[in-house]
Image (cartoon, helix red, strand yellow):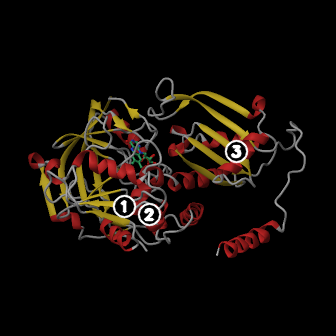
Amino acid sequence: MAYDDLRGFLSTLEKEGQLLRITEEVLPEPDLAAAANAAGRIGEGAPALWFDNVKGFTDARIALNVHGSWANHALALGLPKHTPVKEQVEEFARRWDAFPVAPERREDAPWRENTQEGDDVDLFSVLPLFRLNDGDGGFYLDKAAVVSRDPEDPGHFGKQNVGTYRLQVIGKNRLAIQPVPVHDIALHLRAAEEKGEDLPIAITLGNDPVMAIVAGMPMGYDQSEYEMAGALRGAPAPIATAPLTGFDVPWGSEVVIEGVIESRKRQIEGPFGEFTGHYSGGRRMPVVRIDRVSYRTNPVFESLYLGMPWTECDYLVGPNTCVPLLKQLRAEFPEVQAVNAMYTHGLLAVISTRKRYGGFAKAVAMRAMTTPHGLGYITTVIVVDEDVDPFDLPQVMWAMSSKVNPADDVVVLPNLSVVELAPAAQPAGLTSKMIIDATTPVHPDTRGNFSTPTKDLPEAKDWAARLQRLLSEARG
Ligand SMILES: Cc1cc2nc3c(=O)[nH]c(=O)nc-3n(C[C@H](O)[C@H](O)[C@H](O)COP(=O)(O)O)c2cc1C
């Protein structure tokens, strides 16, 4: 099932019991964010939240926690809601192989219904804005997809980027944006600023659920997010032409904001409660001038609570970080079996691999650190043997505790790039990175005194089923 817009997905979530409508009146702050925060604390299967009775707002329609459980993530991919997380990651990886799937251009985008232009642009009249964490410096649009083109090669469809970059509302027609230097939009902005030009952008809010997944996905620089969305949906992604910039934007978005990142201007942005479970500080960031807003009648404002994991953000960027890393590593090292980079947006990754020869596991770990995502995030890599499941943390702990001799198996590489938001970096943006090789040494690495590993007995699987049957009979 491929969803062309957020509304279609919300109605499926409701039918599946995965959307909760809160009908009694709530306060914009702290109720909206507190409810989304709480959704991450009530256990597996948390629903999306819908609010339309918010004190002080007329006609507010707010959706929160839309991807905020494995059940909702499965439904976003058109899978049954009880699909186990490991199967979701495997299915994601299978669908990746259909890339690229050309998008389908449509004319009648619903966001064409209403327009504000020039001096009439007033975001406060379109969106029911509210703060997320109590130390945030202002209102944020944190689940938008931002479209920009390579100023050196604007006609290249693959180099047109669609990415999620949080935006602070700093005026009725002004935003501050945080382009992390390793991300594609930072490359676009740098190229524009070197020429002394503004960078045109289109910001789309309230997107279909697969668009939200690909916008936060670390793909190659010239790979198109729309062509990846098509592969993941199993159907071409519907796109439309944005009226001011002429950029390709999702057909079904609730709101399309167009304007420019003003060349060489910076303004204080933040603080903002981040995916690391810590606040960013107030920092000087580029500034967006909005020239046009197009929006559906009664737009749904979709926002995402993030902070101390797990929150919606961790579900959203879980599989979409693991699978690109797996595919990018396998392109050179087909021995790689699986990647679990679901902790704090992949600041830590666990990789299982077969080994060609002694030292191979460390080479795989170093390559992981130079993938698009690894450059700015992966700080610790734990490498395990091919028969250890990176998603089974007790197995990973077994490998760490039984295979690692710290003298040679722990490697620290100094002064590598990391997002400024990584709290342990010193200075911000630079960190040491660590490889923990928890694999069994192979020739010519003869260290250790590893005897034959014990394996589960061949009959144990049948016995597990038998024990479960007997247990359920005994319990009635
Ligand atoms: C909710 C959310 C907020 C994000 N905020 C930012 C941000 O402010 N700046 C940034 O550079 N990346 C941010 N990211 C991460 C990028 O979207 C992600 O790493 C993506 O792969 C970048 O793709 P790119 O290299 O094509 O730009 C965010 C991701 C999510 C899911």
Residue in the foreground of this view, choosing between 311 and 110:
311
In the rendered view of the protein, which quadrant contains the C terminus?
Answer: bottom right
Residue 121 vs residue 380: left or right?
left
**Residue that badge 3 annotates:** 397
The residue shown at (74%, 46%) is 398
**Residue at image mark 1:** 48
Rendering coords of residue 322 (x, y %): 56, 52
The residue that label 2 is drawn on is 72
Asked if residue 221 can be seen in this view, the reply is: yes
**Left of 72 or right of it: where is 204?**
left
Point out residue 14 in the picture as x, y percentages from the top left corner: 35, 70
Asked if the residue under mark 1 is in contact with the one under mark 3, i.e. CB atoms within 8 Å, the reply is no
Pointer 2 and pointer 1: residues touching (CB < 8 Å)? yes
Q: Give the mark, 3 or 2, whose residue is nearer the N terminus.
A: 2
How many other residues sit within 10 Å of disc 1, few (<14), some (14-19) or many (≥20)?
Answer: many
> In the image, what residue type sits under mark 2?
Asn
